[in-house]
Amino acid sequence: MDFLSRGTRPPVPAQHQPTTHASQSTGKPKGKSLSGLLRWLVIAVSVIVISSLFWVVAGKLRGSEASHINSDQYQAVFLTNNQVYFGKITDMNSEFFVLTDVFYIETPSQSQADTSATNTNYTLRKLGTNELHAPEDKMVINREQVTFWENLQDDSQVVNKIKEYKANPDAANQQSSGSNSNQNTETPPTESTPTEPTPNATP
């Protein structure tokens, strides 16, 4: 009887059974969530790095042409319609040019121009002084209208004319207005009075 009682053990209660399977099953979803979060973090960092490199390269491409601007000198901007403007380029990008302290050359009209090939009747005008619409001394030029631009040397004729205007703008404005009035006024032809013939002297 003792041997039988010793060989038969009472069953273990359910509450004392090990819960190894439950702990293992709860650990697997945590590992998957951490790996997914790490993957999205790597993708986000890659996107940020690539976009930063793109903007740096694009900025260098845009600034490569602007680095040739000499801020101490005047620039000449040539347009597709053969018009030239002189001034200071303060900003440029792939869409527009910004030009300040603007001057341009005014040529005489076809009716007033001399037909000879040696006509040099050109006048340097200041933007905003003679125009009826009175624009500000600033131009925003469409990049597609610009063929090329140049830095002007200090001893160029245009720069010398600009310096003369800066030294005495009132005299330059009076001279330009006087030249316009002279061009617009035409002197009427003088009528010649007929002379009466002298009678022949009789002997």
Image (cartoon, rainbow, N blue to C red):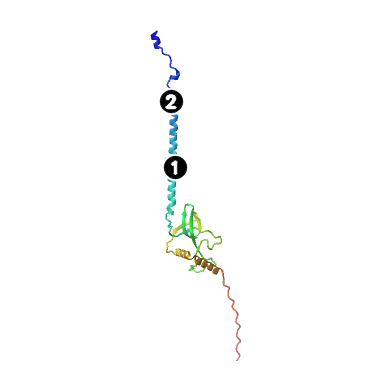
Indicate whether 1 appears above or below 80.
above
Q: Which of these two is toward me, 188 or 51? A: 51
Pointer 2 residue: 23
User: Closer to the camera: disc 2 or disc 1?
Assistant: 2
In the current view of this chain or complex, which residue is farthest to the bottom?
203
Quadrant of the drawing holding the N terminus: top left
Residue at the spot 43% in from the left edge and 24% down from the top edge: 21
In the current view of this chain or complex, which residue is farthest to the left?
3
Pointer 1 residue: 48
Q: Position of residue 153 (x, y in %)?
A: 42, 62
Residue at the spot 45% in from the left edge and 39% down from the top edge: 44
Q: What element does badge 1 sit on?
A: helix
Q: Where is residue 53 in the image (x, y as percent from the top left)?
A: 42, 45
Which corner quadrant of the image does residue 38 belong to?
Answer: top left
Residue 181's tag is: none
Residue kind at label 2, given as amino acid type = Ser
Indicate whether 196 appears above or below 38.
below
Residue kind at label 1, given as amino acid type = Ile
Q: Do the residues labelled 2 and 1 touch (CB within 8 Å)?
A: no
Mark 2 packing: few (<14 Cα in 10 Å), some, or many (20+)?
few
Indicate whether 18 appears above or below 56.
above
Q: Position of residue 70 (x, y in %)?
A: 42, 57
Residue at the spot 44% in from the left edge and 47% down from the top edge: 55
Q: Where is residue 151 in the image (x, y as percent from the top left)?
A: 43, 59
Which corner quadrant of the image does residue 13 belong to?
Answer: top left
Q: How far apart are marks 2 and 1 (CA)?
A: 39 Å
Q: What element does badge 2 sit on?
A: helix
